[in-house]
Each structure stands twice: as structure tokens, then as C-alpha cells.
Image (cartoon, rainbow, N blue to C red):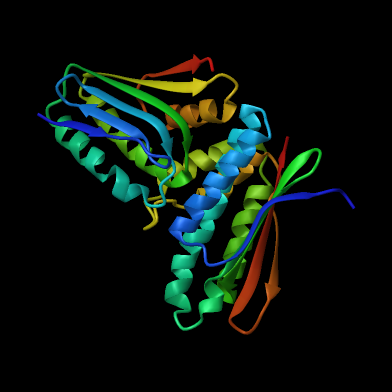
């Protein structure tokens, strides 16, 4: 077992206030670690995208599962070992969204650095604004900044929902 | 004439837009959850400015971080600048990035590939 130090973990409802506090805590922690500015920026950038993904997803779930508070909950964890940072996020998704989500991530994982750059530019310039403004760039950005594949899995909960986990590594 | 000054916060950049001198400046970090709402006043002012722009428009982008939701809004601003440039007026985008921040340099190159306006990549020391 490799030695992992958990820097921050959370389970519950990711609100805007909470997201802001988590980013503040992590910024201070990264500064105190005396990390290289380059790595610190990468980790912070990826954190922003991950947490805002969870936040925007919560809004979606609010419409989809208004009567089920638990489905809005998410988990988040960042840890660090001798060589890398590990970020894990988890949230509920509707089963009918699974296939398109997998396809999007698999497509990104199959790309090299140059292809990812091109893909990012294509999505940035061609797609219109989504109502949240992100327009599907989040995963591409995370893959580019981390420089590694995005691992994920789905755990089927019931007829309607699965739990989606995403694992991101960032080398130090 | 329009002059916009928005003070920066831990999540949003300082923005200066002066239609009198043709200067647009974004500095700090841009990671709001709702970028469209935040950038709306700037997009609208730049829209107005585009109908009667100065002979030269200078743009300084000096961001430490920006999220993907802001990246679409920044592209929106650049598209308006591209339209001004198309009419034969001078437009320059100065893209500042910290020494060693390859991600920010690459982000500038992404825009450079999409927007037909002269970009100047400027590295700044810590």
C-alpha cells in the first residue's frame, strides 16, 4: 500500500459557499506545502474544475430528483503521496446518462497531447454556451492539465441511478 | 463614453474597460461559477464600442487562473475584438503569463489559433 495523506475530504451537498471555502482551504494548504508554483497552479486549476463540475451537477440533480435529497450529495477527496496528487470525486447520475458520459471520457483518454489541444479548441470555438457556460470543456481541461488518463467507474444503485466516480492523478 | 472598472475578488478578475482610450484589461483570477452573468456588462460595453471603435484597441490579459466557464466568455470578448480588427482598425491582444506557467501560455495559444487578431505572448518573472 502506498502512503497517502488525505488533504481534504468531503461528503454532502456542494453549495456555492462550501465550494468557495474548500478552494480557500486548499489554496492555503498548497502554499504551506511549499509546492512549485507550476504544480500548485495545476492542482488548483483541476480542483476548481472538479468542484464546479460537482456544483453544476447538483443543479441538474435538483431538477431531476427534486424529492430525493440524497441524490444531490457528492463526495470529494484530495490526497498526496510522495510522487503525485490524487483527486477523487463521486456523484449520482441518471442511468440514461451513463453511456454518453463514458463515451466522452473514453474519447478524451484515447487522445494524445496534441489531439487534446485540438479537441479543446474545437469545443471552445464550435459549441455554443451551455446554460452554465462550461460547454463540455471541463473534462478536456482536466485531462490536459493533469497530463494523464481520467479513470472512472459506475456503480449501479437502482433502476434509475448509478454512482459515478472519477479519479484524477497529477504528478508533482 | 463608457468606462467600466470592476474590482477583483478571490474568484473574479479586476476589469478595466475604457472606450475613450480603447483599453481593455483583465487581471487576477477568473473562476466564478456563473461566468456569463459576471462578464455580461463587459460584453455589452464592448458591443457598443465595436460600433465606433478607436483607431487602436489594446487588450491586456494577465490572468493567474481561469476556469472553463470563463474561457467561453473570454472567447466571446475576443470575437468582438476580431470583428473590430476585420474593419481595418488596429487591435492587439497582449497575453501575459508567469514564468514557467506553460498551461497559461498554452491557453493563450488556444485563443491565438481561433481568433484572427495579433497576439503578443509576454512572459513575466515572479
Between residue A32 and residue A23, name the one nearer to us.
A32
The residue sitting at 35% across, 42% down in the picture is B73
**Where is A131 relative to A172, above or below?**
below
In this rendering, would B74 be left or right of B65? left
Q: Is residue A115 visible?
A: no
In this rendered view, identify the residue nearer to me: A108 or A18. A18
Q: Where is residue A5 in the image (x, y as percent from the top left)?
A: 77, 48
Instruction: Tell me, yes or no, if residue A159 can be seen here.
Output: yes
Q: Which residue occupies the extreme left position in the image?
A: B1
Report x, y in % for residue B110. 48, 32
- Residue drawn at (80%, 38%) of the image: A83
Residue A29: x %, y % from top left: 63, 41
Task: Check the image and name the residue furthest to the right.
Answer: A1
Determine the image quadrant of residue B50. Answer: top left
Left-right relation of B61 to B84: right
Q: Considering only vertical position in the picture, is B42 above or below B112? A: below
* Left or right of B92 in this view: A121: right
- Which residue appears at 66% of the width and 79% of the height? A157
Q: How many labels does the image show?
A: 0
Q: Quadrant of residue A142?
A: top right
Can you give x and y, in whole percent of width and height, for residue B21 in the image?
A: 18, 19
- Between residue A130 and residue A85, name the one nearer to us: A85
Q: Look at 87% across and 49% down and name the residue there.
A: A2
State which quarter of the image contains the C terminus of chain A: top right
Amino acid at each position: 500500500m502506498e502512503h497517502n495523506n488525505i488533504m481534504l475530504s468531503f461528503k454532502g451537498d456542494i453549495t456555492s459557499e462550501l465550494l468557495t471555502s474548500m478552494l480557500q482551504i486548499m489554496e492555503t494548504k498548497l502554499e504551506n506545502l511549499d509546492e512549485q508554483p507550476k504544480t500548485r497552479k495545476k492542482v488548483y486549476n483541476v480542483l476548481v474544475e472538479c468542484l464546479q463540475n460537482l456544483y453544476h451537477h447538483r443543479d441538474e440533480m435538483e431538477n431531476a430528483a427534486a424529492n430525493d435529497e440524497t441524490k444531490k450529495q457528492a463526495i470529494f477527496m484530495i490526497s498526496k503521496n510522495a510522487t503525485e496528487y490524487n483527486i477523487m470525486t463521486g456523484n449520482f447520475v441518471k442511468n440514461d446518462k451513463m453511456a454518453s458520459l463514458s463515451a466522452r471520457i473514453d474519447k478524451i483518454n484515447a487522445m494524445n497531447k496534441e489531439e487534446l489541444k485540438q479537441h479543446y479548441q474545437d469545443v471552445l470555438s464550435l459549441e455554443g454556451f451551455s446554460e452554465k457556460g462550461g460547454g463540455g470543456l471541463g473534462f478536456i481541461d482536466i485531462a490536459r492539465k493533469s497530463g494523464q488518463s481520467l479513470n472512472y467507474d459506475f456503480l449501479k444503485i437502482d433502476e434509475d441511478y448509478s454512482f459515478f466516480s472519477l479519479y484524477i492523478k497529477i504528478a508533482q | 463614453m463608457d468606462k467600466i472598472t470592476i474590482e477583483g475578488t478571490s474568484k473574479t478578475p479586476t476589469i478595466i474597460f475604457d472606450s475613450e482610450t480603447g483599453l481593455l484589461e483583465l487581471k487576477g483570477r477568473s473562476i466564478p461559477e456563473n461566468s456569463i452573468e459576471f462578464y455580461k456588462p463587459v460584453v455589452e460595453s464592448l458591443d457598443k464600442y465595436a460600433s465606433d471603435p478607436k483607431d487602436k484597441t489594446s487588450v491586456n490579459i494577465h490572468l493567474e487562473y481561469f476556469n472553463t466557464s470563463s474561457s467561453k466568455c473570454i472567447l466571446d470578448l475576443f470575437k468582438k475584438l476580431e470583428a473590430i480588427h476585420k474593419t481595418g482598425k488596429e487591435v492587439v491582444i497582449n497575453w501575459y503569463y508567469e514564468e514557467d506557467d506553460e498551461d497559461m501560455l498554452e491557453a493563450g495559444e488556444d485563443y491565438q489559433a481561433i481568433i484572427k487578431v495579433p497576439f503578443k505572448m509576454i512572459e513575466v518573472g515572479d
